[in-house]
Structure formats: C-alpha cells, structure tokens
Image: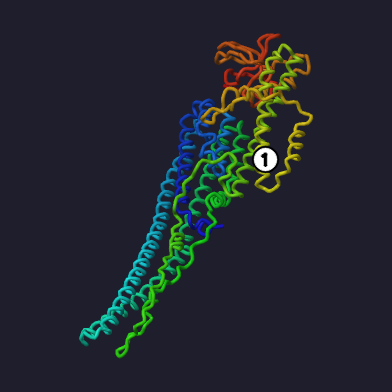
Amino acid sequence: MSWGTELWDQFDNLEKHTQWGIDILEKYIKFVKERTEIELNYAKQLRNLSKKYQPKKNSKEEEEYKYTACKAFLSTLNEMNDYAGQHEVISENMTSQITVDLMRYVQELKQERKSNFHDGRKAQQHIETCWKQLESSKRRFERDCKEADRAQQYFEKMDADINVTKADVEKARQQAQIRHQMAEDSKADYSSTLQRFNQEQWEYYHTHIPNIFQKIQEMEERRIVRIGESMKTYAEVDRQVIPIIGKCLDGIVKAAESINQKNDSQLVVEAYKSGFEPPGDIEFEDYTQPMKRTVSDNSLSSAKEGKPELKFGGKSRGKLWPFIKKNKGATPEDFSNLPPEQRRKKLQQKVDDLNKEIQKETDQRDAITKMKDVYLKNPQMGDPASLDHKLTEVTQNIEKLRLETQKFEAWLAEVEGRLPARSEQARRQSGMYDGQTHQAVTNCAQDRESPDGSYTEEQSQERELKVLATDFDDEFDDEEPLPAIGTCKALYTFEGQNEGTISVTEGEMLSVIEEDKGDGWTRIRRSEDEEGYVPTSYVEVYLDKNAKGAKTYI
C-alpha cells in the first residue's frame, strides 16, 4: 500500500491532508500548553479544557476522528474528564518534555512538507511544459503540411498553364520541394517530441510522483507516530505524581499505543482513491496524407487527394490533468448520490450509530427503572412518581430511534440486494417488538448535547441517577444504618436539590459514612435521620485510622 501508486491523482487532497495533520499537531501542542496553564485550577479547569477540545457533533471535524491518532487524542480528552488533581510539577514537566519538543518538531515538519510539495509542483510544471511543447510541435507539423499542400497545388497549376514561363514553373517546383521538406522536418520533430513526452509522462506517473508521494507518506506516518509518543509522555508525566489516577493514564497509554500509521494511511487511500488509471500514450496523428504524391523534375501529378479529417486527442488530453476539483452537492438522507459501495458503508455506519443510541437510551431507562424500585422500597429517598415523566421520555426516544433504524436498514438491504418482499417485511416489522410495550411517540425528546458537543446538565443528572441507583441498591437492602468511617468539613455551601443529596453549609462538620467510589460523590450524615450525597470537591475528608488510608479530597 503506497500513496504513490494508490493516490497518484490526489495531489491537492494530499496537500490538504498533510496541512490538516500539522494543524492537528499544533492543536495538540496548544492543548498541552493550556493544560499546563490551568493545572493549578484542579479538576474544574481540566474538565473545561477537555470540553473545549471535544470535536463538534455533525461537523467535518468529527469525521476527522476516524484516524487512529485523532482517536487517541480524543481518548486522552475523555480520560482527562474522569480525574482531577493538583500538582505544580506536572506543568513544568509537560512544558519541557512535550510542548518545547513538539514546537521544534512542527517547524521541521513544515519545512519538510514545503520541500516535498515544491518538488511535486515542479514535476507538474515540467510535465505541463512538455505537453505545451508537444502541442506546439503538432500545430507546426499541421501548418507545414497544409502549406506544403498549397505549394504543391500552386506548382501543379503553374505547370499546367501554357502562358507561364519555364522559369516560373521551376521556381514553383522548387518552392513545393522546400515546403515538402519543411513538412517532413516538422513530422520528424513532432514524432520525436511525442516520444519524449510519452517518456516524460511515464516517468512522471510511475517514478517522480510515486517517489514524492512516498516521501510525503513517510513524513505523515512519522507525524502520526510522534503525536502518539507525545501522548505517552503526557501520560507518564501524570503517572509520576498522581498514582490515584493510574487507571486513567493507562487508558491514555492504551489509546496512544493503538495508533497505527499504516491504518491511517489506508484510511486516506479509502477516502481519496479515485480508481482511475493513469493516462496512456498519445497516438501519432499523421498530417501528410494529402501529400503522398512524389515531386518529380520531369512529370507532375495532377491528381489531388482530399484532406483527411483532423482528429485531436481531446480525450487523452482531458485525462492528462486529473487535478481538477469537483463540485459537491447536498448529501441526500439515503446517500443515493454515492457509488454503491460507498453508500453501503455510509448506511451501515448510520445503522451502527443508531443502534448505539438505542443501547444508550436503553441503559438509561434501566437505570431510571432501578432507581424507581429503590424509591418504592425506601420512600424516604424520593418520590417514585417523579421519575415517570423521565421514564416516558426515554421510552419515546427508544421508539423513535428504532423506527429510524428500520428506515436505514431498509435502504441498506436494498443496496445489498437482500431487500425482502413487502409482505415479509411488513410481518417482520409488525413482530419486531413482540413482548415489549411502547407508548405512542407524541413528544420526542430533544438531543441532550449542546451545539458545541459538550455535556449538558441533563446528562450529568442522568449519570448521577445511574450511579445513585446502583449505590442505593447495595446500601439500602439492610435497614441497619451505616457506621461512620470518618468526619469531613464543608469547604463550600452546597444546595442539595436533587433526590438523594443533602445540603451543607460552609465550615459545617459532618460524619462520613461512605467514601467517593470514583463518581465524584461522598455520602455523609448530619444526624441519625438526615444523610445524603455531596460533591467530593466540596468537602475535606478525614478518615479514621481503621480506614484503608487517610485521603484528603478537596
């Protein structure tokens, strides 16, 4: 797999792609620099940074994250959103080991890219010059042939006129011979120029361009490897000072190690490969057909041959220059504007995305149902009826997504040539949800993601409901109250407005009955009958000596 052979006609796209690669690297450098600047602001600033660099939904930037290097970068951002901490040494180490090094590498990469594409444009200009020379030689050959034909006709006319002197006839004969010789010379020059052009064209498409594109591919793959190595360094800097978040760092390393420069190169081939073959040799076009007659000193031919039809290699000429941008129209919902294979891939991707959304909504429904059961068993934790509206909304979302999936699966089946008969399809659709109860889709829920792709408060609440539902199942099976495992001091005032939370006032001392399990919440008790969850970052915890180990959460 080589860009030189697979993407021989994608010079402009490769230029854009490599520039995009440098932009991604510079984006990563900017990301690390901003990370070092806000490290002292702890978890809140780190999560904001992760949110800032998340790709926007339904945008071109989101499509770019199909490359493994970009996926690794995205995984880094997601892992960052799971941990928080304070360590000033992180800022210093990241600046010296990543930012400075990558900024120097970006300058070298820009210079190398500029040199490679300069060579590519130089090769393009050379083949264009050769093409112009061929066109000029061909036109000169055509012109000389026509002039020789006219000179021959004039000589024959003078020779047939009895009133013309012998000297004039001789002069016309000599002129015809001269024109004939000029045509022969032009023919030889055109033939030689054509051979040179075909040779230059073959070397251009089979030697020069493949070599240049191979260098570009190697440069791009080195960039991919380098950004992966930088991500590893990024992870290791955190690992040295924050052992508590080791699991998150392992995830970043895993993402970095999943980078595959060959896979990324293949994705570029799949994205830009046209499937066309390089143009073949241009056929020789003979313009000497009208002058097959032999010029003699003693006899002249009076027969005149008709002019041949002149044909120009318009088709071949059109194929010579593949670097032409194509207009792009609006994409139909069923991707019918794409070739069958590309359309099948798009439809399959759409079906997979819808199935993931269905699974996500199903998990959310299960979490809400579980929490409702907890509320039914323990009314003091909350009102079960307060979850009915949310449960109905999620169920409607699931129904809407399943109907959408059916539509795209039908298009996909049509493309794959396996679309069932109408009656069979109707039976399948009617029996698809046997054993399940769905409410009418009257008020579909809106997308819970903000326009910039960030999480909204609803998502945080949904995640909170899932976590609390799991914890409540484990904690309220027994009626015995949990013993206190330490104390805590409220650093800030917190208004517990959601079910299962508790309000605290700044400076208040309370009992800790359950540590933070990684979800960002700590369970506390004010009195025997008043307990609930508060954000871990709002309290300073002091565990008893018998606990696993004294940890402080700020």
Residue at 47% in and 62% down: 205
Q: Is residue 91 above or below residue 136?
A: above
Q: Quadrant of the C terminus?
A: top right
Residue at 67% in and 45% down: 414
Q: Which residue is mark 1?
A: 409
Residue at 73% in and 43% down: 421
Residue 347 visible in rendering: yes
Count up the numbered dots. 1
Q: Is residue 210 above or below residue 341?
A: below
Q: As rendered, which of 356 and 24 lies closer to the eye?
A: 356
Across and down, in percent, residue 309 comes to 41, 70
Coloring scheme of the render? rainbow
Q: Is residue 439 above or below residue 161?
A: above
Q: Quadrant of residue 395?
A: top right
Across and down, in percent, residue 501 comes to 64, 15
User: Relative to 540, is 197 on the left or the right?
Assistant: left
User: Relative to 455, is 305 on the left or the right?
Assistant: left
Residue at the bottom extreme of this rendering: 298
Residue at the front extreme of this rendering: 162
Residue 550 visible in rendering: no
Q: Secondary structure at mark 1?
A: helix
Q: Quadrant of residue 484?
A: top right
Q: Amino acid at mark 1?
A: Glu
Residue at 45% in and 70% down: 283
Q: As rendered, which of 57 and 293 lies closer to the eye?
A: 293
Label 1: few (<14), some (14–19) or many (≥20) C-alpha neighbours in 10 Å = some
Q: Quadrant of the N terminus?
A: bottom right
Q: Is residue 60 above or below residue 465?
A: below
Across and down, in percent, residue 70 comes to 54, 42
Q: Quadrant of residue 257?
A: top right
